[in-house]
Image (tube, helix red, strand yellow):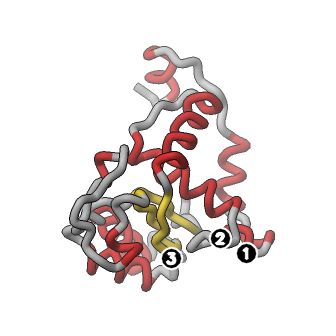
């Protein structure tokens, strides 16, 4: 994409991904492969949100089994990534996750498992609510991610066939 994004939203369970991505972004910046660092914004399921609540969840409950973690292995590292990046950790309900999963399927033709939909549910929350841990409603318009918008304008639809997709990705 040419540079690091302004924001990186992702589901958080054991917190390995948010930690690893943050490490990669910092390494790219140190090597001058990027000019900035993104705000890391993680989303936990409401029934399995130990980092958000800052306490172990003895019996985590959520439909998003991949993030149904009550005591994340990379908890401290995730907290550091969130703090260093000026990001946030927030929660989304199972209902919000299912709504996001359904929205992706209906509007984008993409089916994802529930934990992956947690990040989209979080995106909707950030866009729709000033009470979100990281509200996009507070971002000045001049800070829109212009590079991504430009790339989106250059995208061309591809038929959902194996041959067409392979051709589009150069295989």
Circles 1 and 2, Cβ within 8 Å, touching? The answer is yes
Marks 2 and 3 sit apart, C-alpha to C-alpha, by 11 Å
* Residue tagged 3: 87
In this rendering, the answer to whether 160 lies above or below 54 is above
* Residue tagged 2: 135
In this rendering, the answer to whether 145 lies above or below 30 is above
Picture coordinates of residue 37 (x, y %)?
Answer: 50, 75
**Quarter of the view holding residue 57:** bottom left
Looking at the image, which residue sits at the far right? Answer: 141
Which dot, 2 or 3, sits closer to the camera?
2
Name the residue at 55% across, 64% down: 5
Q: In this image, 119 relative to 148: left or right?
A: left
* Residue tagged 1: 138
Q: In this image, 171 relative to 86: left or right?
A: left
How many C-alpha atoms fall within 10 Å of the one at disc 2: few (<14), some, or many (≥20)? some
Residue 66 numbered mark, or none:
none
Name the residue at 72% across, 65% down: 144
Q: What element carries label 2?
A: loop
Q: In this image, 144 relative to 72: left or right?
A: right
Disc 1 or 3, which lies upstream in sequence?
A: 3
Q: In this image, 86 relative to 12: left or right?
A: right
Marks 1 and 2 sit apart, C-alpha to C-alpha, by 6 Å
Q: What element carries label 1?
A: helix
In this rendering, the answer to whether 121 lies above or below 29 is above
Looking at the image, which residue sits at the far front? Answer: 59
Name the residue at 55% across, 60% down: 2
How many C-alpha atoms fall within 10 Å of the one at disc 3: few (<14), some, or many (≥20)? some
């Amino acid at each position: 994409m040419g540079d690091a994004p302004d924001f990186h939203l992702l589901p958080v369970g054991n917190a390995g991904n948010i930690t690893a991505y943050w490490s990669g972004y910092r390494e790219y910046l140190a090597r001058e492969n990027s000019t900035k660092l993104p705000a890391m914004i993680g989303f936990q399921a409401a029934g399995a949100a130990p980092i958000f609540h800052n306490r172990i969840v003895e019996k985590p409950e959520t439909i998003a089994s991949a993030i149904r973690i009550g005591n994340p292995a990379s908890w401290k590292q995730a907290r550091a990534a969130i703090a260093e990046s000026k990001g946030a950790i927030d929660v989304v309900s199972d209902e919000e996750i299912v709504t996001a999963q359904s929205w992706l399927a209906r509007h984008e033709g993409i089916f994802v498992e529930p934990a992956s939909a947690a990040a989209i549910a979080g995106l909707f929350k950030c866009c729709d609510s000033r009470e979100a841990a990281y509200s996009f409603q507070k971002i000045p318009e001049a800070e829109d991610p212009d590079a991504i918008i430009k790339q989106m304008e250059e995208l061309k639809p591809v038929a959902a066939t194996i041959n067409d997709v392979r051709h589009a990705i150069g295989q």
